[in-house]
Image (cartoon, coloured by chain):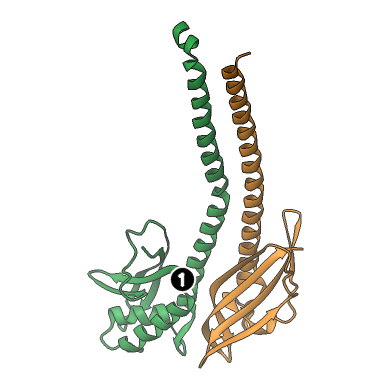
Amino acid sequence: MAGLNNHGVADVLAMAFMFVLLVLAAVFMHSYSLRPLRAATNRQLELKSEHLYKTLELAWVRPGVSFFRAAAENLLLEQPIVPRPYLRSTMENVLEYLHPSGYAVAVSLSYENASWELSWPEGAGLGLGAEKQFARQGEVRLTMAGGENIAVPVTVRIFEIA
Amino acid sequence: MTLTQILKTLVTIILVISFLLVTVSAYQQHRRISALAELSDATTAIVTRLSVEELAYVDNDGNLHMYTIDPAKLEGLSTRREFGGENFDFQVSVRYEAGGERVLGPFGSTPPEDRTRGSLAVSCVLYENAHFLPAKLSVMAWRA
């Protein structure tokens, strides 16, 4: 140690360590300070996901028929009130109009082995493996002709386009 | 004191000063970011309150339809809210498509140019001519 001190190496090492500490501290403090803003942005995206779900649940594709009800009928009935091509085209236009900027949207309904899926932009998939995604799940209830009450699970997912 | 010792002392002083400057700068940035996050949260809170309560459509039986905007309620809307002891002003508008995009509003005072503004647009339902239409509720908020 005395030899190192004689050559001034210990001082140089101490200064180099301080320099590394300075760089690390700067990176850590600046990245940590962005956390509240990222969290606030995520809360807004959660809210957008909730609102999109409620919009598709309540808005009409045809008078008296909501988007989710029409999709559930397409899944379960042979002759739904809203024909499949019309529903898909209209819902695609609505998703294009309502989607959060920079994010894709996927809507999926499933019952037993059948499923009804739609995503915007086309081909974006359901976003199941997306790093950043905000999903809202619920169900649509349909009463069949025989009086049977069926609950169809619905998922609306907003996700970052890769 | 040799020249080497003077140089070492100088480098150490520079490093200490740099560390202090970085700490002060990070603290200032943290305060700016926190203020932005508070504005963002205030905007989120305003949108939520508008869509589930203040602008929500009430039918003839008195049932409240959350997430459904009644355009008749837009005109008389008060556009100032208090959150955490701070006042926020906001401007609101509703957009929807009916053979081209239509805009209701903006309602509220004009946003000042010299203040930071937070904006948020969410989807909602618009009750128009006895129909429930998909629409977008946009709010721009700033500190009063």
Tell me if I can see residue B99 in this picture: yes
Q: Determine whether the residue tagged by mark 1 lies in a helix, strand or loop.
A: helix
Q: Amino acid at mark 1?
A: Tyr
Indicate the chain coloured green by its letter: A
Does residue B4 appear left or right of residue B27 in this picture?
left
Q: Residue at x 36, y 63 (%)?
A: A162
Q: Residue at x 35, y 79 (%)?
A: A71
Query: Closer to the camera, B85 or A141?
Result: B85
Query: Closer to the camera, B117 or A52?
Result: B117
Q: Is residue B100 above or below residue B53?
A: below
- For label 1, the crowd category at 10 Å Cα-Cα, with few meaning under 14, some 14 to 19 and many 20 or more, is many
Q: Quadrant of the C terminus of chain B?
A: bottom right
Q: Is residue B119 above or below residue B17?
A: below
Q: Is residue B42 above or below residue A120?
A: above
Chain letter of the residue carrying label 1: A
Q: Residue at x 50, y 15 (%)?
A: A8
Residue matched to label 1 = A53
Q: Residue at x 41, y 58 (%)?
A: A132
Query: Closer to the camera, A114 or B22?
Result: B22
Does residue A22 appear left or right of residue A99 in this picture?
right
Q: Colour of chain B?
A: orange
